[in-house]
Image: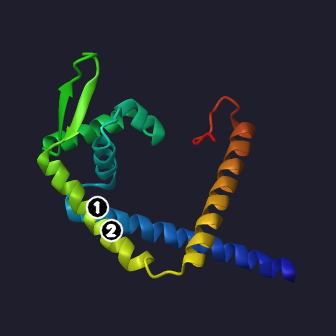
Amino acid sequence: MQQLARMKDIHGAIEQLGILAEVFEERRAALARDAGVTVEQWRVLEEIATEHFIPSMFARSRASSQAAVSKILRQLLDDNLIAVAIAKRDRRQRNYALTNRGKRVLDSVRTTRQAAIDAIWSDLPAAELTAFRTFARRLSERIEAYARRESGRTAPDVAPRIAF
């Protein structure tokens, strides 16, 4: 009977995690949409804003293809959100920068995101936030460890998505 109750708790937790992930992604998409971009475009704008943007490294870090990143870059260029120039040191490289319009869009997303964070998270008790952060980190580590073990069983030549 205890095992049944334990499995019910586990399945309930998994269900709530799924709901949380879905709601989080819906809100993220709404923030981007309200600023006139997609979530993927927002991610690229954030990375370009760091001034250390390299498309191939970005694609690898996101487990995405270089073609997909190139498509997003074309969209951002077409929408005048970014500008591109040939690097002075290495003419094979491109330097990407936010245009004034791109800066305004990114500022808008950041401002709206911060307002959402303030409204949703700011009055949660510190102990609950710490416990959630600790639990989420441990759960992520366990999921990644499981994925590494499983990928080793099914395809030894396939690298895990995230390396520690």
What type is the residue that disc 1 sits on? Answer: Arg
Residue at the image point whose x is 42% and y is 33% from the top: 57
Question: With respect to residue 86, does 101 lie above or below?
Answer: below
Question: With respect to residue 69, does 2 lie above or below?
Answer: below
Asked whether, in this view, residue 2 is left or right of residue 163, the answer is right
Whether residues under marks 1 and 2 lie with C-beta atoms below 8 angstroms apart, the answer is yes
Asked whether, in this view, residue 91 is left or right of residue 146, the answer is left
Q: CA distance from mark 1 to mark 2?
A: 6 Å
Give percent across and percent down for residue 5: 79, 82
What type is the residue that disc 2 sits on? Answer: Gln
Circle 2 packing at 10 Å, graded few (<14), some (14-19), many (20+), is few
Give percent across and percent down for residue 133: 58, 66
What is the count of numbered marks? 2
The disc at residue 110 is 1
Mark 2: which secondary structure?
A: helix
Give percent across and percent down for residue 119: 36, 79
Q: In which quadrant of the rendered view does residue 76 lie?
A: top left
